[in-house]
Amino acid sequence: MAGGILAARIAEHGIHPRTGDRLKIALMDMGPYFKGDPKPGYGIPLRRQKYVNLPGEDDFEKSTPWGTICGIGGQSLHWGAQALLPSEEDHEDWVAETGVDWSYEKLTDARFEITEMFHISPEPEELMPPGAFRFRDAAVKMGYRLQRYPGARLNCIRCGYCRMKGCRFDCKSSTLVRYIPIAERNGVRILPDTTVEKVILEKKGAGAVARGVYYTQGGSAQEARADCVILSCNSRGDSVLLFKSGYGPRNKVKDLIAENSNVGGNARMSLLYADHGLFDEPVKRGDLGWDVNFYFVERGPNGHMNLMVRDMYGQLGSLGNNPTDMALHEMAPDLGREHKQFMKKWLGFGSVELMVGREDYVRGEIDPTGRAILNPNHPEVLKRLQEGRELARDIMLKMGAKKTTDLKRPIELRVTGITGTPGPCRGGADRSNSVINSDFECHDIENLFICDNGVIPKLSSTENYGAATAMMACHAWRRIVAKHFS
Amino acid sequence: MDTESKQSAQREHLSREQALQDAVEIEPENFSRRDFLKTASAVAASAAMAGPSWSALAAPAVDRHAVVAALGDALIPSDPDDPGYKDLEPYKITEEVLKALPGVSDADLELLNEKSKPRFGGKSFLELSGPEREQYLRQIVDGSAVADAKELETLRRVFRNTRRRVFTLYYSNFPEHQWPKDRNGMAILKPGDQHQITNPNTKELVTAWDQIGFVGALTWEEEERRRNIVKKVHWHENWSPLNFATAKPQKE
C-alpha cells in the first residue's frame, strides 16, 4: 500500500539536497505490474482480463511466503476498500503508548490528501441494500448512534467483489490506480517480479548505515546502491527482511549487525467476528453490492474494549461471502429440499460484523518466517465478542430475521496470512520502545526509512489498516521530503 | 442398543456375511446378473494377477460412482421445474466430485451402502428410494443410523466430506463454474470479445446461480446497467489522479 504513495510523491516533490537534481527512485515488488492509467468505472483491458472475479477464487496467484499479495500496488490490490480513518483517540493512543509525534492535527494534510486521492466517502443511500436500512432502524430504536461507513472507491459500479479480489473497473482505490501513474510520470523506475533479499547494512558504532539492497530479478542476483532505502513490505515482510539483513532482536537474527528488540515485536491485530441472519425478504440487493453501510460503537468501560457493530449487507461474491459459503454455513439445513429452499434465500442471507477495539490483551510478534505469532482468543476478548454477538442477534431479530447463527457456537479467532498486524516496526520516541521515529527514520540505521502498516503502534477505532497505512504514507512522504530531499 | 442386542446384531451380520460368502463360493448362479458381472470382473482382474482362487470371489466391490451419485441426488434432489444434482450427470458432475473427495475410501462408501440394511428391510443405500435415502442420511447425522461408535464416525465423515464437496461444486455453478486461463493467469477470452467478460454462466443450462439469483462476474450489459444507475447518483467522469495537486513541503 504505502510504497506506491511514497515513490510517487517523493519523486514528484523531492530533489537531491546537494545538486538540486530530480531524484532517481526505484520501486521494487515481488509480484507483477498490471500497468495502465486508470479509467475509474470502466477499467482497462489488461486488468479486466486479469481479474476474473470468480467467487471462491483469488484473482492473485502470487503471494509472499507469509500470505500477503505480491504486485505493484501491494495489499491495496486486494483490500476491501473499507476506509474508516483513525480517530482522534487512535492518535492520542499512539502518542501515549510510544511518544511518537503523530497527533491528529499533525496528520491533517495527510488525511486530507488520502481522502481526496482515494475518494473516501460513505455509500449513498440510493445505492444501499434494504438490510442496511433495517439494521440502521433497529439499532437506532435500541438507542445507538449510527454512522455511515466510508469506502475508498471512485465511480464504483457495485459489483460486490471488493474484498480480496482485484477490481476490474479501476473503482477500488489502490496505489496502483491512484499513485503509480504519478510515479511513472515522475521518472520512478518500476521493477516488478523483483525480490529484495537483504538491505545492505554497514556497521557503524552500535548501529548501521543502509547502503542499498541485494535483490533477485529474473533468477539473477543483483545489487542496487542507494542513498536511502525505504521499506514498505507490510509489517511481516519488513520484519523478515530486517532479520535477514542483520537487524532486530538477538534471538531472531542470525548475523546480527544492529540490535533492536522491537523489530518484529509489539504486533497487534483486528479482532473481528461475524454472525449471520436469514430473512424471508431480501436484505442484500441482487443488482448492486459493496460491503459495509452503517456502523455504531458501543463503548466499553473507560473507553476500552469498545465494540464496533456494522452491517455487511452489501457483500456479494467476495471471498467468504458467496453461494458456496452460504451452502456450507452452519445455519444451512443438512440436505435435501430444505437445503435448496434455504439457498433460494441468497438475498435474504447476510451478516453483522463485530470488532473489539482498544484492548490490551492481544499482543504478539512476527517470527523469522513472517508468521504472526499471536493468540487472539483471550478470554476477555471472547467474552466481549460474545456480548457483541448477543447484541447483533437482537438487532437481527428486530430486523425480522427468521434465524440467526447459534450463539452457543464457540468463537475461535484465527490469525491468517492476510491478518493485518500493526506494531512490528512501530514509530516511537526512542529505540527502547520502537523501531522508527516520528519522521519514519529507523532509530538504529541511518538512511533507512520504514512506512507501512507495521509502523502504526495500534489501531482501535477501525478494523482495516489499509486507509490508515495510506494516510501514514501521505504523512511520511511529507516528512521525508522536508527533512531530506528539499 | 444394549450389549445383548448388539451382539445379536453382530451375529446376524456375520451370519449374513458368511451366507453371502457361501453363496459366492457354492452357488454363484443365485446372484443377480449385475452382481455376477461385477464379481466376474473382480475375479478376472484377480486371476490376471495371482491365478484363480476362491478367495477372489469375495463380496463385490462398492460402485464408488454409484454411491456418490446417489449421495449427491439426496443432497440436492431434483423436481420438475427445479433441477438438482442428477440433472447435471450428463455433464459428469459425479466424476468431478470424485476428483477431489478426500477422506472417503471405497471401504467407507461400502460401509455407508451396507449400513442401511438393518433399518430399511435389508436394502442397501443404493436400493433405497429417494425419501428413504434422505431418512437414512438424517439418521447418520443424528447418530441413530448405527450403534457402533466407530462406524458412526466413519459414516458421518463420509457424509460430511461428500456434502462439502457436492455443495461446493454445485453452488460454484457447475458445470459453468470456471474460466480458462493461460499460463500467465490471464483469462482466455472468447473470440471477438471486446470487453474481457469472464462470467461462465450461460442461459443454455439452469445451474445453481440461476436458481438462487446470483449474478457472478458482470456481463457487459449488466455493467452498463449498473453504470447508468450510479452515474445518476455519484460519478466523476474522466477523473485522473494527476488532477489533485499537493503542496511541496517546506524544507526543515
Image (cartoon, grey):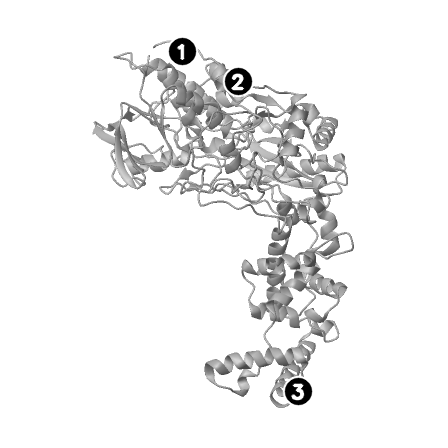
Q: What residue type is labelled 3?
A: Glu
Residue B27 in view here:
yes
Q: Name the residue under label 1.
A: B248
Secondary structure type for disc 1? loop
Q: Residue A427, position in %: x, y?
A: 39, 25
Asked whether B54 or A371 is in front, the reply is: B54
Q: Residue B162, position in %: x, y?
A: 61, 59
The span from disc 3 to disc 1 (Cα, nearest Å) is 95 Å
The span from disc 3 to disc 2 (Cα, nearest Å) is 84 Å
Assign the C terminus of chain B to one quadrant of the image: top left
Q: Name the residue under label 2.
A: A116
Asked whether B71 or A132 is in front, the reply is: B71
Please state which of the two labelled residues, at mark 3 or mark 2, is closer to the viewer: 3
Residue at position x 75%, y 49% in the image: A341
The span from disc 2 to disc 1 (Cα, nearest Å) is 17 Å
Q: What residue type is labelled 1?
A: Lys
Q: Name the residue under label 3.
A: B29
How many C-alpha atoms fall within 10 Å of the one at disc 3: few (<14), some, or many (≥20)? few
